Image (cartoon, helix red, strand yellow):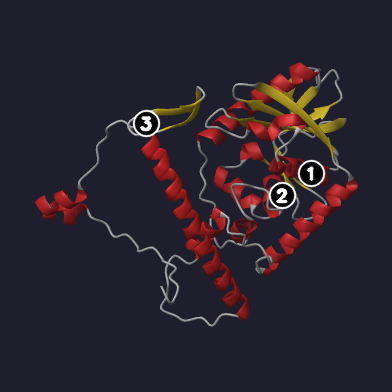
């Protein structure tokens, strides 16, 4: 395999910069529009250098990293397979194909014992499959349902497909530690037809990265799209832009959706007031002994009285007051 770096020798910034030179496994689901945390446009903006990757991780990703080896060990013990950790970044046949595979599964031998995890510096022989280790529900609610009925969450499924395409290893195992459940194991064999479709999508995406022309249809209204546009265009510059008829049609769509939303909000308020009236000062509402909804008071808290502090301590206010840029507001002409 084509090794381009040993990940143990890279800083996080170096690793992020190397990832920007191609498409990695976690990018596959984003390109196909099935990643709930990112969007094709946000990914394109990052790969082209328009925005920086500011995500530093959270408690869920931290524990996912901490438990990755443990999940692999549990998988090896449960299946009796020989698991190998080879911490490298690989490049596939295409220059933009990058892969950070969690673990490989190999034929048991005197070097690689069945039921154990071994770490190596060089490419292991007799690789038979890939192992991806995940966690969910360890911190926060997670997505345990995504693993029900022998499923694999879509974003992880396409991550496995990307690794299969990069390494020519068609079989991928997924082991996920689910909070309150334990470890579940899934296996997928990726067909050439499945991989061809993904590679076509990734190639088209990377062509847009190299040309710095964003993919058509990439804007979907994902939260990441709005965050990306805000980062690229943080403030208005006092200019006027002449738009196309297509944008005029989108404005009409926006108006219609806005009206429908306002009507839905009115119906929501009308229904909610009946619920609040029915429960009155109770904590819980039941029907035939079954809880329907609750309406409980939060604990009494404290808040800082900014207005009063400013009036009573004008000098301190000026000393500690910092400038905050105004947010851009979308207003329709007749509103």
Vertical position of residue 171 compared to residue 194: above or below = above
Return the disc, 2 or 1, that comes first in the chain's sequence: 2
Q: Mark 2 Cα within 10 Å, few/some/many (few <14, many 20+)?
A: many
Left or right of 55 on screen, residue 105: right
Q: Mark 3 Cα within 10 Å, few/some/many (few <14, many 20+)?
A: few
Q: Please identify the quadrant where the N terminus is shown.
A: top right
Residue farthest toward the left in the current orientation of the protein = 312
Residue denoted by label 2: 28
Pick whichever, 134 or 226, lies toward us.
226
CA distance for labels 3 and 1: 47 Å
Residue drawn at the location 55% of the way across and 72% of the way down: 251
Pick whichever, 51 or 279, lies toward us.
279
Q: Mark 1 Cα within 10 Å, few/some/many (few <14, many 20+)?
A: many
Give the structural element (helix, strand or loop) at label 1. helix
Vertical position of residue 88 compared to residue 318: above or below = above
Left or right of 169 on screen, residue 270: left
Residue denoted by label 3: 296
Give the structural element (helix, strand or loop) at label 3. loop
Q: Position of residue 245 (x, y in %)?
A: 61, 80
Do the residues under discs 2 and 1 have CB atoms within 8 angstroms?
yes
Pick whichever, 272 or 41, lies toward us.
272
Circle nearer the viewer, 3 or 1: 3
Q: Please identify the quadrant where the C terminus is shown.
A: bottom left
Vertical position of residue 214 compared to residue 60: above or below = below
Q: Quadrant of residue 2?
A: top right
Q: Which mark is residue 161?
A: 1
Q: Position of residue 12 (x, y in %)?
A: 56, 43
Return the disc, 3 or 1, that comes first in the chain's sequence: 1
Do the residues under discs 3 and 1 have CB atoms within 8 angstroms?
no
Q: Position of residue 278 (x, y in %)?
A: 39, 36
Q: Tell me, yes or no, if residue 5 can be seen here.
A: no
Q: Position of residue 176 (x, y in %)?
A: 68, 28
């Amino acid at each position: 395999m084509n090794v381009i770096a040993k990940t143990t020798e890279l800083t996080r910034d170096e690793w992020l910069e190397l990832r920007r030179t191609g498409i990695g496994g976690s990018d596959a689901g984003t390109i196909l529009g099935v990643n709930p945390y990112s969007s094709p446009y946000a990914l394109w903006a990052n790969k082209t250098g328009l925005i920086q990757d500011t995500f530093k991780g959270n408690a869920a990703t931290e524990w996912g990293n901490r438990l990755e080896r443990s999940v692999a060990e549990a998988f090896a013990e449960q299946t009796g397979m020989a698991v190998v950790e080879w911490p490298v970044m690989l490049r596939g046949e295409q220059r933009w194909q990058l892969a950070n595979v969690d673990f490989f599964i190999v034929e048991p031998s005197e070097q690689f014992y069945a039921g154990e995890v071994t770490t190596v510096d060089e490419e292991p022989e007799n690789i038979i499959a890939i192992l991806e280790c995940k966690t969910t529900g360890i911190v926060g609610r997670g997505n345990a349902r995504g693993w029900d009925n022998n499923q694999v969450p879509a974003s992880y499924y396409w991550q496995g497909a990307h690794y299969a395409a990069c390494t020519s290893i068609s079989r991928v195992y997924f082991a996920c530690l689910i909070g309150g459940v334990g470890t579940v194991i899934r296996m997928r064999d990726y067909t050439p037809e499945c991989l061809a479709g993904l590679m076509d999508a990734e190639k088209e995406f990377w062509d847009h990265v190299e040309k710095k022309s964003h993919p058509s249809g990439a804007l979907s209204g994902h939260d990441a799209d709005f965050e990306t546009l805000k980062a690229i265009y943080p403030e208005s510059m006092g200019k006027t832009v002449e738009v196309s008829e297509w944008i005029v049609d989108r404005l009409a769509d926006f108006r219609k959706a806005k009206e429908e939303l306002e009507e839905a909000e009115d119906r929501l308020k009308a229904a909610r007031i009946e619920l609040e009236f029915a429960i009155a000062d109770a904590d819980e509402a039941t029907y035939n002994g079954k809880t329907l909804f609750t309406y409980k008071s939060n604990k009494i808290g404290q808040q800082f009285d900014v207005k009063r502090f400013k009036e009573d301590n004008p000098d301190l206010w000026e000393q500690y007051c910092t400038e905050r840029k105004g947010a851009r507001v979308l207003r329709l002409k007749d509103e």
